[in-house]
Amino acid sequence: MTPAMESRLPWQLGLGGLVPFLATASGMWLAPVAWQAALLMAFLAYGAVILSFLGGIHWGLVMIAPRPAEVATRGRWLASMAPSLLAWPALLVGGLAGTGLLALGFVLVMGLEQRHRQRLALPAWYLSLRWLLTLVVLACHGLVIWRLAVG
């Protein structure tokens, strides 16, 4: 199987995973006001799940690291838990603050991946996919934050 074929399914799944973000963020603007609380909760819940999933990717990467007891690897273990530890309070706080906290989490994970891309040994297609997904996810967060700010 060629590298292009190997990465096609993750791209399709990743792009499909944007649908709940796009649907709930646009629904915040287009749906009746009575639906907005449910849409916001759906947006926050899905964002928390996906942010935790990204942490899980890094947990898996550190599990297969050649020397998991090294000090540098210990930091990677902690970093793999950070997305979940940001996602949970974002759900508890909700609203504008929770949406902002999730957005911060997505930015931090992307920054971690960019900063340590050589050491993480990620496939070439992964970072391209993550950039696109993160930009769309952050745009959706921006739309929700804007909607919450204007009432």
Image (cartoon, grey):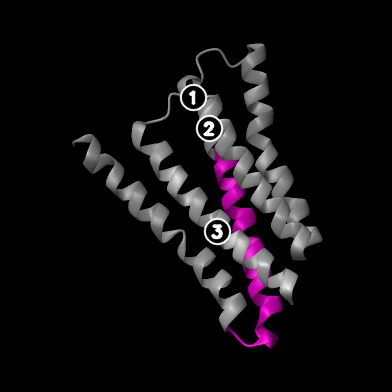
Please say whether residue 59 is visible from this viewpoint. no
Question: What is the C-alpha distance between the residues marked 2 and 1?
Answer: 8 Å
Q: Position of residue 4 (x, y in %)?
A: 23, 40
Residue under numbered circle 3: 139
The answer to which quarter of the image holds residue 30 is bottom right
Residue ID at (34%, 54%): 12
Say whether disc 3 or disc 1 marks the residue closer to the N-terminus.
Answer: 1
| Left or right side of 126 for 73 | right
Distance, label 2 to label 3, CA atoms, is 19 Å
Q: Position of residue 74 (x, y in %)?
A: 67, 20
**Few, some or many C-alpha atoms within 10 Å of disc 2 (few <14, some 14-19, many ≥20)?**
some
| Residue position for label 2 | 113
Let me know if residue 37 is in the magenta part. yes
- Look at the picture and state if 95 lies above or below 47: below
Query: Which range of residues does the magenta coloring cover?
Result: 31-56
90 to 64, vertically: above or below: below
| Residue contact between numbered discs 3 and 1, judged by CB atoms under 8 Å | no
Closer to the N terminus: mark 2 or mark 1?
2
Quadrant that contains the C terminus: bottom right
The three-letter code of the residue at mark 1 reads Leu
| Amino acid type, residue under disc 2 in the picture | Glu
Marker disc for residue 120: 1
Q: Are marks 2 and 1 in contact (CB under 8 Å)?
A: yes
